[in-house]
Amino acid sequence: MKNKEEEKFKEFLAESFDQGVNIRELRLSTEEMEYIKRVYPKASLNKSIPKEASEGKIWYKVSLLPPETDIDSINDARLAAIQKENVQLKQELEALKRSMALGSDN
């Protein structure tokens, strides 16, 4: 694949697997399939229709997971977001307890 084609295919993959989608059926050329295997070594590609289409592409069921480093950074970001939310909830709970205690004193 040429650089321009590779960039276009990279964008196509990003759009295909956005919003948490991990599995898609895609019609891929041999070059596109090899690109996925190279960039996402843990990806699973299974032919869903064994017959090749007229333009030389084949339908694959693609299970795509981010590269290891991306998984680690995603998990770290999720953990940080959860910890931040927990701190905020604790602060809100303490504020609610204080306001209820002041209200019961009256």
Image (tube, grey):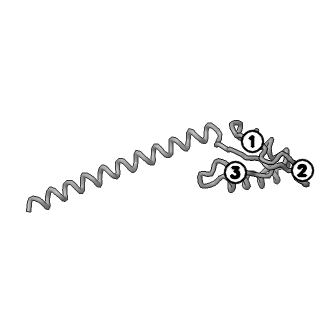
How crowded pointer 2 is (Cα within 10 Å; few <14, some 14-19, many 20+) is rated as few
Q: Residue 69 falls in which quadrant of the image? A: top right
Q: Residue at x 33, y 52 (%)?
A: 89
Left or right? Give the position of 86 relative to 16.
left
Q: Is residue 53 above or below residue 65?
A: below
Counting residues from the start of the chain, the first of labels 1 and 3 encountered is: 3
Question: Of callouts 1 and 2, which one flags the residue occurring earlier in the amino acid sequence?
Answer: 1
Query: CA separation, marks 1 and 3?
Result: 10 Å
**Label 3, on which residue?**
24
Residue on which disc 2 sits: 56
* Three-letter residue code for mark 1: Leu
Residue 36's disc number: none
Question: Callout 3: 10 Å neighbours few (<14), some, many (20+)?
Answer: some
Q: Residue at x 52, y 42 (%)?
A: 75
Task: From this view, report whether residue 69 is shown above or below residue 58.
Answer: above
Instruction: Name the secondary structure under disc 2.
Output: loop
Amino acid type indicated by mark 3:
Arg
Q: Which residue is drawn at 11% across and 59% down?
A: 104
Q: What residue type is labelled 2?
A: Gly
Looking at the image, which is closer to me, 3 or 12? 12
Q: The residue tagged with tag 3: helix, strand or loop? A: strand
Q: In this view, does 99 lie to the left or right of 65?
A: left
Task: Report the residue marked by disc 1.
Answer: 45
Using the numbered discs, state the Cα–Cα distance from disc 1 to disc 2 in whole angstroms.
17 Å
